[in-house]
Each structure stands twice: as structure tokens, then as C-alpha cells.
Image: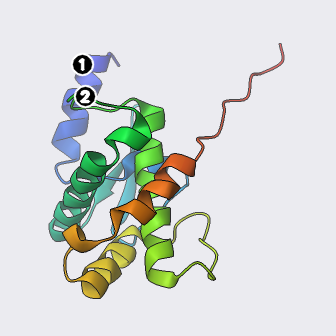
Amino acid sequence: MDQDAFRQTYREVNEVFCAFEKSVLTNECRCRHTERFCIAEREGVHCKSEQSQQRCLHWLELLREQARFALRTEEERRLLPHGKAIRLQVGGMRGVHKVIAGDDEPVPNPIDDVDQILTAAEQHFGTLEEVPFSAIMREVAAFQVRKRRRRKD
């Protein structure tokens, strides 16, 4: 299947896409609203809740705005490279978990439920805009994407 046909089919099948698809597919995060599917031997992630998808998209938008320095991205590019997108998604969720649970409780690996953590953050701080981003940015900056292992031929 060529790339254009795959993208078109993907958009048709996955109208409510998961905003955390990259981190879900790399097994760094989980969510009660995700549902995996396959198209032509490729895997995608669907969100079963439009309300949760909107919360996640809003969170990632806020996080990306705050993380420009931590990710060293000053330009207004719409799409982040894969590694930076993973750092933003996973580091951001690790940070918000730490802020809610406190430094004494270890951050689970993988993150258990993205929607549950974002709901808890909204309840704890009133809105996602009120979350202390300075504490979360430490986790975004510190998170390291796993290096690809090279195969021995």
C-alpha cells in the first residue's frame, strides 16, 4: 500500500484519533479510551471518547507552548519530529503525575491512564491552564527516548 493511500484510509477509519498515539504505540502510555487497529500491517490507535480526545489535544497544545525551550523548538512547525513528540507526551504525563501524586510516589512505567491523570489534574488545579508547568518541564527535559538498537548482520 502506498503512503498516500494509507493516509487516506487511516483518516477514514480513524476519525477520532488518539492524541497520544505515539506514546501508546511505543508502550510508554496507556489509556482506558484507546483502541488499537491495523491497516495494511500498520498499527494505529483510536480514541473512544471525543470529550477525552479534546482534553488531550488541549493538554498537548498547552504543553507544547510551554515546552519550546525544553525541546529546543522555536519555530512554529505544526508537527514535531517523533523523538520530540514522544518526549512531550511521555515527559508531560510523567510530570503531571508527579505534580498530582507528589515526589514520594514513583511514576509508573508505562503511564497507567492518560485520561484519568488529566481528569485528576483538572479536578486538582481547576483547569489544565493552572497546572504548574515549571515542574512538568523538568520531566519533559529529563525524559530520554530509547535509542534504536542496531541489528547485527
Residue 30 can be seen, yes or no? no
- The circle on residue 4 is 1
Q: Give neighbour class at mark 1: few <14, some 14-19, many 20+ (Cα, 10 Å).
A: few
SS assignment at label 1? helix
Q: Residue at coordinates 19% horizontally, 38% vertically from top-left?
A: 11
- The circle on residue 148 is none
Task: Tell me the amino acid under the disc marked 2.
Answer: Arg
Q: Position of residue 67 (x, y in %)?
A: 35, 46
Q: Are marks 1 and 2 in contact (CB under 8 Å)?
A: yes
Q: Position of residue 112 (x, y in %)?
A: 51, 72
The foreground one among 66 and 22 is: 66
Task: Tell me the amino acid under the disc marked 1.
Answer: Asp
Q: Report the Cα–Cα distance between label 1 and label 2.
A: 5 Å
Q: Which residue is mark 2?
A: 7
| Res. 75 image quadrant | top left
Quadrant in the picture for the C terminus = top right
Q: Position of residue 16 (x, y in %)?
A: 19, 54
Q: Give neighbour class at mark 2: few <14, some 14-19, many 20+ (Cα, 10 Å).
A: few
In the picture, measured across the screen, residue 30 lies left or right of residue 146, that is left
SS assignment at label 2? helix
| Res. 85 image quadrant | top left
Q: Taking 71 as reference, is 93 above or below it?
A: below
